[in-house]
Image (spheres, coloured by chain):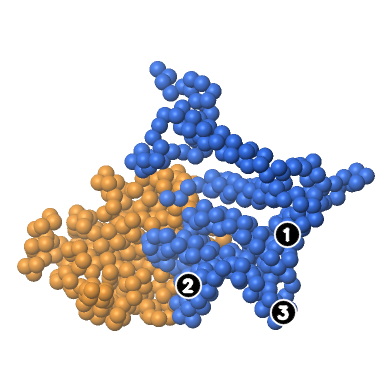
Chain colours: A orange, B blue
Amino acid sequence: MERETSTHSIGDEVIIIADHLVKTFPGPIKALDDFSVRVKRGEVMVLIGPSGSGKSTFLRCLNGLEAIDSGAIVIDGIPLDDNENNRLAIRREVGMVFQSFNLFPHLSVLENINLAQCLVRKKSKEKATETTKALLNKVGVGEKMHSYPDDLSGGQQQRVAIARALALRPKVMLFDEATSALDPEMIGEVLDVMRTLAEEGMTMVVVSHEMGFAREVSDRVVFMDAGRIVEEGATEDFFLQPVQERTREFLRQIL
Amino acid sequence: MLTDRPKTQLGALYRARNNIIPPPPDYMRSPFVSSTSIRDLFAFGLTVAGLFWLIQRGSEQLGYNWHWRQIPRYFFTLADGHFVAGPLLKGLVVTLEITAMSLVLAGVIGLVTALLRLSSSMVGRWMARVYLELIRNTPLLVQIFFLYFVMAPIFDIGRTATAVLALSLFEGAYASEIFRAGIESIGRGQWEASHSLGLSRYHTYRRIILPQAVRRILPPLTSQAVSLIKDSALVSTIAVYDLTMEGRTIIAETFLTFEIWFLVAAIYLALTLTLSALASGLERRFPRIA
């Protein structure tokens, strides 16, 4: 079937392998309950589900911010295990964007984006600044290079945060409700940046409540509840012909 | 209408003082004094006058002869146009040396202890905890005597070194709790953003967490430094010739009790106020972080 929704192409190569993930929080709450998923290079996968269903936990497990109880995660051939070097290697290849931006308030926009390039990629300050300028122009906040995060609007901060994550040239980008903390009029500018990234072929795992964005940009939608996959499918099929009753109910509530 | 233009010089002065120590927001105001500026100033004037009268009457009854003219030579003398430092100035230099060294060492001990408390090593956490509890729950004077009479002979360390060590260990314990509180006050998001960018633990602390934490803890850290200056007077008990010790020596020889203690207290005050002013200047120079 010809895809109408997205304009980018997906390879056959699997870049994210998550197998039988289990994550329990004190309570005990099973945030992930034998959760398995694979993502191909260039694919845009959107995770949806009620709050507390484990979407964010899964994202945070992917780059080791949250340790899994059992299961296996392999990203671009690197296993995420107890080895600190592997963990750091994965984090270099995986960029993450947070709901609350988490820019470093004591550093200027330029320094925010330069920092990891210099420390992690060992770039010279000049080279890093070059990259930073290009990225800031790409996300449309080029003129704010010397401002501090507190002086920017929410939408600008989030776009800087995306630029910061992109500065390491990651192979995968994770978006954890990137637009949920934004005023309505700023959601569009952030989604535009994400859309551009998708069109350029970035592999993206997106937790979002923006169904319009999911429909338009994503290749695959995964519906989660209670740490398990309830239903997953190609975006068009998922929205037009959901199989599970639970999915239909959820879509009725939010659409 | 310029309603809030100062009508009198007194009013202008009152407003100027009010800016240096700003009043609390209205909802937080205590019931202690509720008055207009005039009543406030009047009450203050009355209190000062009363205190002054009490002191005046007391010292008259005591029959104390003030000899302020003799004091300057204990500070410095000019012999043939050459500047010769007096005992009080020498003592001040010793106090400055001891506090400066202790300040640096206490800072290092404080930071290292805080990092040990926050480390994954159980031994490290316990060592930090035991050190903290031992130091915070015994008197500084006893610690100084213990180090001087017990540890110094064993390890063969000198008087000044013992003084610096005692002060650093004591203030370092308090500094470590300040550091820890500052580090823990940095939101989880900052750590996660740093980790997600692939920064190591060292770089996360060095570039993200500590710069923000240190700015937040500058005020309590300054108080601790002020405490250190004041506590340094205790090292006079192990015959380190600091400002206090020199003062005591002069008094023993001359019985200029009132003058010397007034002067010594004033010098300590000048030191601590200078330090506080430096710190608040530092605070103003950096952009404020919420």
Q: Residue at x 54, y 45 (%)?
A: B284
The mark that comes first in sequence, 1 or 2, is: 2
- Mark 2, residue position: B117
Q: Is residue B130 above or below residue B18?
A: below
Q: Secondary structure at mark 2?
A: helix
Dividing the picture into quadrants, the one containing residue A48 is bottom left
Q: In the image, what residue type sits under mark 2?
A: Arg
Same subunit under labels 1 and 2?
A: yes
Q: In the image, what residue type sits under mark 1?
A: Met
Question: Label 1 marks which chain's residue?
Answer: B
Residue sitting at the far left: A245
The mark that comes first in sequence, 1 or 3, is: 3
Q: Position of residue A58 (x, y in %)?
A: 27, 70
A244 left or right, relative to B149: left
Query: In the image, which is nearer the foreground, mark 1 or mark 2?
Result: 1
The quarter of the image holding the N terminus of chain A is: bottom left
- Mark 1, residue position: B245
Query: In the image, which is nearer the foreground, mark 1 or mark 3?
Result: 1
Question: Label 2 marks which chain's residue?
Answer: B
Q: Is residue A19 above or below residue A165?
A: below
Q: Secondary structure at mark 1?
A: helix
Q: Is residue B132 above or below residue B270?
A: below
The mark that comes first in sequence, 2 or 3, is: 2
Q: Position of residue B207 (x, y in %)?
A: 51, 61
A169 left or right, relative to A24: right
